[in-house]
Amino acid sequence: MILRIATIGLVAALMTGCAGEVKREGNLAAPAKLSVQKYKQVTVSLNDQAQTELSDNVQFDPDRLRDTITRVMKAKGMIADNAADKLDIKITDIRVRSNFSAIMFGFMAGSDHVTGTVKPLDESDKPLETFEVSASYALGGLGGGQNDARMSWLYDKFAELTVKELTGQTQKQ
């Protein structure tokens, strides 16, 4: 009986260990697809709160997040030198557990997360739309607790959700 309960708890923890979501302002449904599918550049910056949180979360690297998003968008043919539009991402909340906490305590130490507001901008820097992307990672242990593994997963998930939303592949839940 105890083994059964422990197994159910472990499965539940694993299922909620890694997550991501996209929210639109006012719960608006995602458009079928943005009319603009190519962007000249991706910028990632931090708002005041995230800038303050950065001092306690030094493993987070906004440039690495930008590079990951750019890499995923290039692979999908969404980056072009001759495009006029840009993608602006403002990170609003970050939390990264210490390597020790992630390995020793796993999901009991809370989750690592990155949340940001994504705005595709036209050539005059006017937002075409706005949505929030959030990625979290709560697993740990020797395999899933290493800083690089956790941060890579967060950057990849954030990029995946951003691109899916921009291309109309996400659906309102």
Image: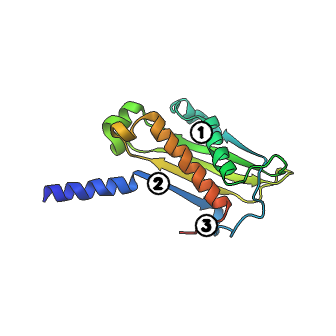
Location of residue 129 with respect to 57 vertically, above or below: below
| Alpha carbon distance from label 1 to label 3 | 24 Å
**Residue type, numbered disc 2:** Ala
Left or right, residue 30 beside residue 147: right
Front position among marks 3 and 2: 2
On screen, residue 146 versus residue 135, left or right, reads: left
What residue sits right under mark 2 in the picture?
19
Q: Which residue is mark 1?
A: 50
Element carrying mark 2 = strand
Residue hosting label 3: 27
In x, y percent, where is residue 87? 73, 49
Of residues 38 and 42, which is closer to you in this image? 38
x%, y% of residue 157?
Answer: 54, 50
Quadrant assignment for the N terminus: bottom left
Circles 3 and 2: CB atoms closer than 8 Å? no
- Neighbour tally class for label 3: few under 14, some 14-19, many 20 plus, Cα within 10 Å: few
Colour scheme in the image?
Answer: rainbow
Q: Give the quarter of the image for residue 24.
A: bottom right
The residue most toward the left is 1
Cα separation, mark 1 vs mark 2, equals 20 Å
Task: Kindly state the secondary structure of the residue where label 3 is placed.
Answer: helix
Relative vertical location of residue 80 with respect to residue 64 in this rendering, above or below? below
